[in-house]
């Protein structure tokens, strides 16, 4: 007897396989789906010396590594920015906006919404990933007291509250300010820090020990020691950037003034030596005179802490010394 296996099941199996393969080929490819667009930006606040403030807006992207706080590079350009001006700084005047390359954006202050509205002049002039925009404006007073937030929003469209809203990845631009009890000195702190900074005045911080600059510092320093302490809600990674001191003077050369500084971490002093370790309130700090941020010999910018700006403001009566210090996080004392 011949034992022959029927061929129908095998043919049915082959046919079924072909149908299944056809279904797999016809199904849409998941890997080929269009990825979701990335829309991220960061913003920070600087200024505080002359009543002029600048909010810097950066579209996340550019050469690696990405700017601080950015988690990915944006996939579209940024076309509009809105900055809410907090009470005490209203109205903003002399509003302008430009890119570092010189492209002028349309910028104005809206007296109804209390916002600065900034729009790119045409689609080809938007901020591409990695590019920045400088929004500069004047305020009536630089130090109304307390901590103020300049809430900043951005969109991909060339319109305020338009399409493609961007997500801010940094903290909102913030300013903290205080006036010394004797009324001689004001202190403003600007940046993208998140949380409260407690600014107080007074103390006995001294850099008279410096072999090169000690005598000069003793004769020319801030009227009051400034104590900058992060509050309990301060978030690491969102740090105070610039601390600006302003105090009256009569005909002094601003360049004579030196800043004695106490930090929980070591830094390079003006003389190029290591700072001295000093016990303050039971804790050891590194104390020394700060160098300027810009090094004219190398043409490079020194790491923080350092003096970023120093000038004599002759628009006030009497004249005022203005000194700005770029700070790392948590640094508490200067004089």
Image (cartoon, grey):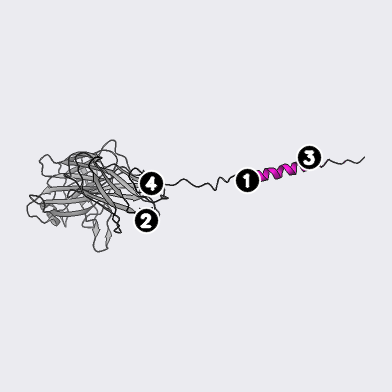
Mark 4 falls on what kind of element?
A: strand
Q: Which mark is residue 124?
A: 2
The one nearer the camera, 154 or 229, is 154
Residue furthest bottom as drawn = 297
Q: Secondary structure at mark 2?
A: helix
Kindly identify the residue that appears in the image at 69 percent across and 43 percent down.
19
Marks 1 & 4, CB-CB < 8 Å contact: no
The 10 Å Cα crowd at callout 3, few under 14, some 14 to 19, many 20 or more, is: few
The CA distance from mark 2 to mark 3 is 65 Å
The alpha-carbon separation of the residues under discs 4 and 2 comes to: 19 Å
Q: Residue 319 has which mark?
A: none
* Left or right of 202, for residue 163: right
- Say which residue label 3 marks: 9
Look at the image and say whether residue 5 sits in the magenta stretch: yes
Counting from the top left corner in percent of width and height, residue 37 is at: 44, 47
Q: Is residue 276 visible?
A: no
The answer to whether 126 appears left or right of 185 in the picture is right
Secondary structure at badge 3 equals helix
Residue 105 drawn at (x, y percent): 29, 53
Q: Residue at x 20, y 45 (%)?
A: 188
What's the magenta region?
A: 1-25
Q: Which residue is mark 1?
A: 26
Q: Residue at x 30, y 52 (%)?
A: 133
């Amino acid at each position: 007897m011949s034992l022959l296996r029927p061929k129908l099941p095998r043919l049915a199996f082959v046919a079924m396989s072909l149908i299944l393969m056809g279904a797999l080929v016809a199904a849409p490819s998941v890997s080929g789906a269009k990825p979701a667009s990335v829309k991220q930006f960061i913003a920070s606040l600087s200024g505080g010396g002359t009543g002029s403030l600048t909010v810097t807006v950066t579209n996340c992207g550019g050469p690696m590594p990405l700017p601080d706080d950015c988690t990915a590079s944006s996939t579209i350009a940024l076309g509009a920015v809105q900055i809410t001006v907090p009470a005490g700084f209203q109205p903003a005047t002399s509003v302008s906006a430009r890119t570092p390359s010189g492209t002028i954006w349309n910028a104005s202050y809206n007296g109804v919404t209390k916002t600065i509205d900034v729009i790119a002049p045409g689609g080809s002039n938007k901020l591409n990933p990695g590019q920045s925009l400088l929004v500069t404006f004047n305020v009536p007073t630089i130090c109304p007291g307390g901590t103020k937030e300049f809430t900043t929003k951005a969109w991909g469209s060339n319109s305020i509250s338009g399409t493609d809203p961007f997500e801010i990845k940094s903290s909102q631009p913030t300013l903290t300010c205080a006036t010394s009890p004797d009324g001689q000195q004001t202190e403003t702190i600007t940046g993208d820090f998140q949380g409260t900074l407690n600014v107080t005045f007074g103390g006995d911080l001294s850099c008279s020990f410096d072999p090169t600059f000690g005598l000069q510092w003793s004769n020319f320093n801030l009227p009051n020691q400034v104590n900058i302490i992060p509050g309990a809600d301060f978030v690491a990674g969102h740090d105070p950037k610039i601390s600006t001191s302003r105090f009256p003077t009569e005909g002094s050369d601003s360049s004579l003034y030196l800043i004695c500084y106490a930090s929980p971490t070591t830094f390079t002093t003006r003389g190029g030596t290591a700072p001295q370790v000093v016990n303050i309130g039971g804790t050891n700090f590194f104390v020394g005179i700060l160098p300027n941020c810009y090094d004219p010999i190398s043409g490079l910018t020194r790491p923080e802490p350092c003096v970023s700006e120093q000038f004599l403001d002759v628009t006030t009566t009497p004249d005022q010394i203005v000194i700005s210090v770029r700070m790392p996080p948590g640094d508490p004392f200067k004089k």
